[in-house]
């Protein structure tokens, strides 16, 4: 992968293993930032990372290329993720906002 850029999306995940998100959690949403040259590469690297964590990606919100203008409108967590992304750690995320019931 070249250094084409970093991308960000809110990602919806569900556990493949009952303990992946904590006991009883049905799913979660998280801001996930990843180094990727294009949206397709972003999807592939995030899906692989989540699979390693026993999580299935349900969907991605709009995938955005991280630019100074995008960062200017982002919360502190995104700035922290952007500061820590590297070749060694190309996928960054912190908080999974979990939910315990599905809407009927």
Image (cartoon, grey):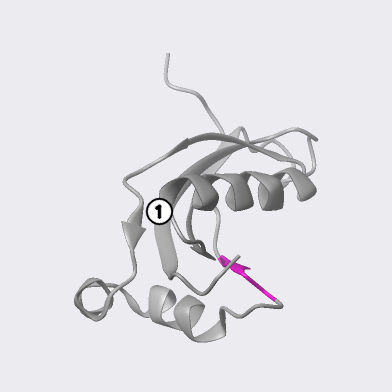
Residue 27 lies in the magenta stretch: no
- Along the horizontal axis of the image, is 30 left or right of 79? right
Q: In the picture shown, does residue 2 fall above or below 80?
A: above
Q: Residue at x 71, y 78 (%)?
A: 88
Q: Residue at x 19, y 76 (%)?
A: 69
Tell me the quarter of the picture where residue 18 sits. top right
Tell me the quarter of the picture where residue 66 sits. bottom left
Closest to the observer: 15 or 8?
8
Q: In the picture shown, does residue 10 fall above or below 27?
A: below
Q: Quadrant of the N terminus?
A: bottom right
- Along the horizontal axis of the image, is 84 left or right of 56? left
Q: How many marks?
A: 1
Q: Residue at x 56, y 83 (%)?
A: 84
Q: In the picture shown, does residue 27 fall above or below 29?
A: above
Q: Residue 60 in the image: x percent, y percent? A: 43, 41
Q: Residue 91 in the image: x percent, y percent? A: 60, 65
- Residue beneath disc 1: 9
């Amino acid at each position: 992968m070249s250094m084409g850029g970093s991308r960000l999306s809110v990602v919806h995940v569900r556990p493949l293993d009952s303990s992946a998100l904590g006991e009883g959690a049905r799913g979660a949403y998280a801001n996930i930032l990843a180094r990727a040259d294009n949206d397709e590469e972003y999807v592939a690297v995030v899906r692989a990372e989540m699979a390693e964590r026993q999580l299935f990606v349900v969907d991605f919100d709009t995938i955005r290329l991280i630019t100074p203008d995008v960062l200017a409108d982002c919360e502190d967590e995104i700035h922290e993720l952007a500061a820590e992304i590297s070749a060694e750690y190309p996928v960054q995320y912190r908080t999974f906002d979990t939910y315990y019931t599905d809407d009927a």
